[in-house]
Image (cartoon, coloured by chain):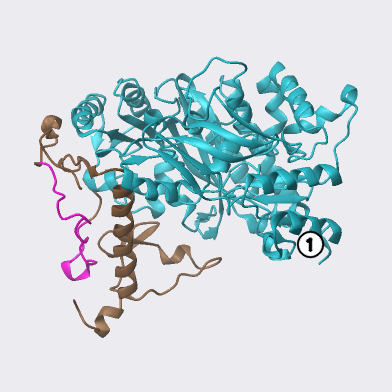
Chain colours: A cyan, B brown
């Protein structure tokens, strides 16, 4: 299999084995590399071989990672960090082969500090696993992505993740207090808000923590993180409401989000297309009459004395704004199902109704509340054009989810979910998907939004628009990249950052 | 606990819910068979396996609630939207939902759809 031949010689593999302490931590075999090629986002499966890494390594310490990165600099080999591999951008997908640094064995809890309310971990730990351990101490680490059962702290940092309960507890950037980081040169530093690892607010120097959030592996590898601990909630409250039209539901969403209830963790608005999709397969929605054309989901967490009166207020607001309660069983069951799409096989429908296996793609954006109705219309119109023309896509509907940390109003994580029949991908169909994706992103920018609220914007169809969205900030990005990664070894090819090595910078990409 | 019966292995004939969905047990839905003839074929699942999957599902949801909080607040308010279709005959229902993982859970006093203030501050959630 020519495409699977590794481009890294035996000498380098031996050096890696010496660094990592054994053959079992250096994986040049084809299955190990194939399994670390793609992520759940749409992927040009007909070109799989182009994205294979040359070798995967499994470090256990910060020192291992540092030495691997130094080796990469000596030999000019790309390094691609990989955590859970659950991302919906392509941060963990190697564009130029090289060494995949898979951090999953770096999964130890290093310190639980119940006095200063922090937990320090290696970044290969999964949040669900961490919270199982924390439960006995009466605290949680409240970072709750849809991928909660399978994603990993390091990936959450690399993508600057978004949490389903961020309206109450904040998102990853708010929950990571500080981190230990291997820079692209192999140097190890600690970054936070300033001072020690457990300081949450400082005004000393540049605020570097945010620079190393969401860089998609282009600026280094986080190896340890000190995380926020919050009291384990005494009560959870979930309430779902039906509406007969989108406009009324949109107004109700705004009223709930602006309620000022501190325990409110999130408000989600499902549109008519989403309900049509859910009516095919979801036991909570199949029995709903077709007069239900929009649904709002809401959830609260906190102490009993807070949640109980807040729940009464929330129910009253929903009723006064036209919502019909869907009952405790649906509300509680559907809320508990919020991570399921990462764990269930996905299928879609062709235009004739036949079921086919489909890959799920959610095109995410940050959209101001005022623009949600218009964006919804434009996005569905784009999806329909591509469905009609190519026949391998399926519109799975939209949702809009409160996006702010601690203050769930203003702008919304807005997604249109599109099924893609990957088995039918070829160059033409892949190009069509990228065009579709770009059109969707352009709508977001035109309405004052951002291309992405949580996935990242590294993929074709998004990345071309990053300079437009960032403006002068993109020039700063390039200067930072060139300064921190002089040999362009960290995830080269991502975010158009090869441009940092062109022209006056006088450097070329490594490969 | 029921022992093995041949009848228990054969799911009942489905009833049509809508153009996309059929139902063999109450609230256990399947894709309409005619939608799965070309690219993916449906599997035949014995009744016991359907019951196992449904029970496991409830186990999982209970676990997820318990994972995130000590208790779950219920309103006791009935759904304000009437579901489509007639109830399944009793002999065609799946096994009822098992009880909550913590026997201490109870619903709040049921309130009417018109009385949302009946979310009772004195009630207890799970756990």
Query: Which residues make up the magenta segment?
Result: B86-108
Q: Nearer the viewer, residue B97 or A9?
A: A9
**Relative side of A276 to A494, left or right:** left
Q: Nearer the viewer, residue B72 or A356?
A: B72
Do we see residue A247 in this rendering? yes
**Relative side of A147 to A301, left or right:** right
Q: Quarter-wise, where is residue A76 in the image?
A: top right
Which quadrant is home to the N terminus of chain A? bottom right
Which quadrant is home to the C terminus of chain A? top right
Residue B15: x and y in percent read 29, 65
Q: Which residue is mark 1?
A: A4
Q: Is residue B97 magenta?
A: yes
Please report, as a chain letter, where disc 1 is located.
A
Q: Is residue A252 above or below residue B18?
A: above
Residue A414: x and y in percent read 49, 32
Q: Is residue A276 magenta?
A: no
Q: Nearer the viewer, residue B81 or A402?
A: A402
Q: How many marks?
A: 1
Q: Residue at x 72, y 36 (%)?
A: A187
Name the main secondary structure of what is drawn in magenta. Answer: loop
Packing grade of label 1 (10 A; few <14, some 14-19, many >=20) is: some
């Amino acid at each position: 299999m020519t495409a699977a031949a590794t481009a890294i010689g035996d000498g380098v593999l031996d050096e890696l084995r010496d660094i990592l302490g054994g053959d079992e931590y250096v994986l040049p075999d084809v299955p190990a590399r194939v399994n670390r090629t793609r992520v759940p986002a749409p992927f040009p499966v007909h070109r799989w071989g182009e994205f294979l890494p040359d070798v995967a390594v499994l470090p256990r310490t910060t020192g291992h990672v540092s030495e691997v990165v130094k080796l990469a600099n000596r030999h000019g080999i790309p390094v691609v960090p990989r955590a859970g591999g659950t991302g919906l951008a392509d941060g963990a997908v190697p564009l130029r082969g090289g060494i995949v640094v898979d951090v999953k064995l770096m999964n130890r809890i290093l310190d639980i500090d119940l006095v200063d309310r922090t937990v320090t971990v290696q970044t290969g730990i999964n949040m669900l696993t961490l919270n199982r351990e924390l439960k006995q101490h009466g605290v949680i680490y409240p970072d709750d992505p849809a991928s909660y059962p399978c994603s990993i702290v390091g990936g959450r940092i690399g993508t600057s993740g978004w949490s389903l309960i961020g309206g109450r507890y904040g998102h990853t950037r708010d929950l990571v207090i500080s981190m230990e980081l291997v820079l692209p040169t192999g140097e190890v530093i600690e970054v936070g808000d300033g001072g020690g690892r457990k300081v949450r607010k400082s005004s000393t120097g540049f605020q570097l923590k945010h620079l190393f959030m969401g860089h998609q592996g282009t600026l280094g590898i986080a190896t340890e993180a000190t995380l926020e601990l919050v009291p384990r909630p005494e009560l959870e409250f979930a309430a779902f409401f039906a509406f007969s039209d989108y406009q009324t539901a949109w107004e109700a969403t705004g009223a709930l989000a602006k309620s000022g209830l501190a325990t409110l963790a999130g408000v989600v608005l499902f549109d008519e297309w989403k309900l049509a999709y859910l009516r095919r397969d979801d036991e909570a929605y199949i029995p709903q009459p077709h007069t239900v054309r929009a649904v709002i989901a809401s959830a609260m967490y906190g102490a009993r004395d807070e949640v109980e009166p807040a729940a009464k207020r929330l129910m009253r607001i929903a009723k006064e704004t036209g919502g019909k309660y869907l009952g405790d069983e649906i509300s509680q069951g559907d809320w508990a199902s919020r991570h399921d799409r990462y764990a269930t096989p996905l299928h879609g429908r062709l235009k004739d109704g036949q079921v086919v296996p489909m890959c799920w793609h959610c095109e995410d954006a940050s959209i101001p509340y005022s623009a949600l109705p218009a964006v919804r219309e434009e996005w569905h119109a784009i999806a329909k054009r591509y469905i009609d023309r190519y026949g391998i896509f399926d519109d799975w509907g939209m949702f809009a989810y409160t996006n702010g940390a601690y203050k769930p109003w203003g702008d919304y994580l807005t997604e249109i979910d599109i099924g893609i029949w990957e088995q039918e991908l070829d160059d033409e169909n892949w190009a069509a998907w990228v065009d579709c994706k770009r059109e969707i992103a352009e709508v977001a920018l035109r309405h004052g939004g951002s291309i992405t609220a949580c996935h990242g914007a590294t993929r074709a169809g998004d990345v071309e628009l990053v300079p437009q969205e960032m403006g002068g900030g993109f020039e700063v990005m390039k200067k930072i990249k060139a300064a921190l990664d002089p040999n362009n070894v960290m995830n080269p090819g991502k975010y158009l950052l090869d441009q940092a090595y062109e022209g006056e910078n006088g450097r070329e990409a490594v490969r | 606990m029921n022992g093995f019966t041949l009848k228990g292995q054969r799911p009942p004939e489905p009833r049509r819910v809508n153009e996309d969905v059929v139902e063999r047990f109450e609230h256990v839905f399947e894709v309409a068979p005619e939608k799965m003839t070309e690219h993916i074929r449906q599997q035949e699942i014995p009744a016991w396996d359907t019951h196992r999957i449904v029970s496991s599902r409830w186990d999982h949801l209970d676990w997820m609630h318990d994972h995130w909080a000590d208790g779950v607040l219920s309103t006791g308010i009935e759904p304000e939207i009437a579901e489509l279709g007639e109830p399944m005959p009793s002999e065609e229902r799946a096994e009822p939902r098992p009880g909550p993982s913590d026997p201490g859970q109870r619903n709040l006093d049921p309130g009417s759809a018109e009385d949302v203030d009946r979310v009772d501050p004195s009630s207890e959630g799970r756990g």
